[in-house]
Image: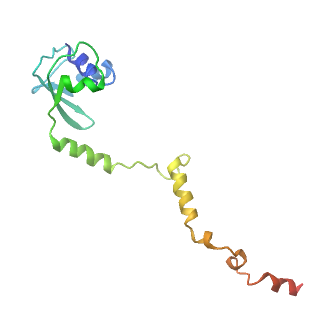
Amino acid sequence: MRIDKFLWSIRFYKTRTIATEEIKKNRVAIGEATVKSSKEVKEGDVIKIRKNQIDYKIKVIQIPKSRIGAKLVPLHIKDVTDKEQYELLKLRKMSQDYYRIKGEGRPTKKDRRDMDEYVENDVTSDFTDWDDFFGESNPSDHDDES
């Protein structure tokens, strides 16, 4: 089976076109040599794939006849990627800034909840006597002056 079709059929890439483009960008290799899309994959080959700044290594156990379900993927390939690569991926995900830049668009649902929580925990919400809050001592004192 062609390597582009193989990578698509084991669900490493969403479409065969994306798999072909990644191969053209020299991000896929069998052994140490980069390959073309038409390269045939055989059982026992170790495929190196650069995806999301991580170097994945998979060993071909069996060639599928067509695209397979996600649960069946472990029957066809074995992941032999270094643990360090997965640790790098985990660190990158943790270090990413998931929040938008201030002033960029409407608040997200999470932003709104954070604002609501802040307002609920604000000091002003503890006041029940608004006259004391605004500096007025007693409303009856103002009635005597009129």
Residue at the (14%, 39%) spot, across then down: 82
The image quadrant where one finds the N terminus is: top left
Residue at the (53%, 54%) spot, across then down: 113
The image quadrant where one finds the C terminus is: bottom right
Instruction: Give the percent coordinates (x, y) of residue 29.
Output: 15, 25
Instruction: Give the percent coordinates (x, y) of residue 125.
Output: 62, 69
**Is 133 situated left or right of 29 in this image?**
right
Vertical position of residue 133 compared to residue 111: above or below: below
Given the current orientation, which residue lies at the most extreme right position? 146
Coloration of the structure image? rainbow
Vertical position of residue 142 compared to residue 42: above or below: below
In front: 19, or 127? 127
Is residue 12 at all visible to an observer of this figure?
A: no
Is residue 141 at all visible to an observer of this figure?
A: yes
Q: Which quadrant holds residue 11? A: top left
**Is 93 situated left or right of 98 in this image?**
left
Q: Which quadrant holds residue 22? A: top left
Instruction: Give the percent coordinates (x, y) of residue 46.
Output: 12, 26
Query: What count of labels does the image hold?
Result: 0
In front: 67, or 88? 67
Residue at the (70%, 81%) spot, across then down: 135
